[in-house]
Amino acid sequence: MVRSAQSATSNRLEPHSSAATAHQTAWKRGHGRGGSVGEKIQIIPGFKTGSAFLTSLGANLRIADDDLLPSPTYTPVLRATPGFHHFLPHQSPLATAIMPLDDMDCDSSEHGSETPRNDPFEGVPPLSTTLATEEKDIVAALKLVADSVAQQRQTASRILIFHPLNMAIFTAVLALMVQFLYKSKSDIALLLTTGAGVTMAALVAVKWFTGDYLLFAEDINWAWLGDDQVYITKYGDEVIGSCVVGWEKGEGRGNRRKKWGRGIVRAWTVRLRYRGKAVGSALLEEAAKGVEKKGGDGLVFAEDHANSRRVLKSIYNSHFDKKEKKYRDALQAITARTGDLCKKR
């Protein structure tokens, strides 16, 4: 009777022991390496019914590697992969790939269109040096010459202000003013006021001494031009350089020649912002070629050219004299390179 009770008890416990064993096996499969999400969910009570649905849903949402689109550089993979925390994905080859120019040309030719190429000089206005024939160009050239004459006033003013002799005189006047006016600290305001008045008087004197350059600039007009030729340099539609060339008659050499002459430069200037860029040299070269075609015997600066006038004393004109000598030497070097014109000289 005791044996039958034990067998009955073992029969009642056997189903429970087999269920426990199955539960442990499922737990090991779910938490072991490589277990799927469905197997892991099987061990949770109450979720056995939905595990099949979740397993099928995960299989349907899984995307193959071949169907993935190219990703930007170093885009992390969002799927769970072995060793995910220990490496970064390789850089996509499409992230830094550049299509060769030949392939671009082939593609554009197939579509019937040409590939636009970037021209470094695209949009840059042309630079040309010619003989002025239109009235508007001649007027612009004369205005440019008049501006160059007026600009000499600024140079002369700067020379007067910073000349060592004038600086010494101005300093001496200020020293005498301090010596006679300063008696106590209460005289400081008087010194400052008087010093400002002396400075203003000096600037007014500078303006008065250099004012004749404005009158010289007003003399540049059609009457001053006469029948002379005007060579201009245009940057697009803007006149940036001007050279006025006259003709000076002279006796020819030999019995075969009657009367010859030579060209004289009456004005030569370049707009201030374009100076130092060989624009003036191109103007003189074009003028020398024009004189050569005309049969001239040379090209020189006129003694009374537009920028030759001086309004200051000779001790202040050294700067102007050096510049004029430099320009005459440049003209001589240019005419020496004009071939036949050099041989005639």
Image (spheres, rainbow, N blue to C red):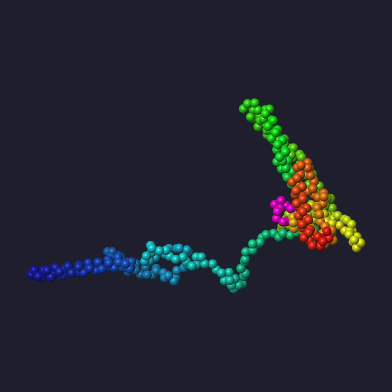
Q: Is residue 53 visible?
A: no
Give, as a single range, the part of the protein colored magenta: 268-279
Q: Residue at x 89, y 57 (%)?
A: 251
Q: Quadrant of the C terminus?
A: bottom right
Comparing 194 with 176, the one in front is 176
Where residue 290 appears, as percent x and y from the top left, is 81, 60
Q: Residue at x 44, y 66 (%)?
A: 90
268 is higher (above) or lower (below) than 30: above
Comparing 204 with 300, the one in front is 300
Where residue 153 appears, as percent x and y from the top left, is 75, 44
Within the magenta stretch, is there residue 160?
Answer: no
Q: Residue at x 27, y 67 (%)?
A: 28
52 is higher (above) or lower (below) than 204: below
Q: Residue at x 80, y 53 (%)?
A: 301
54 is higher (above) or lower (below) than 216: below
Relative side of 92 to 248, left or right: left
* Res 117 quadrant in image: bottom right
* Res 46 quadrant in image: bottom left
Relative side of 98 to 341, left or right: left
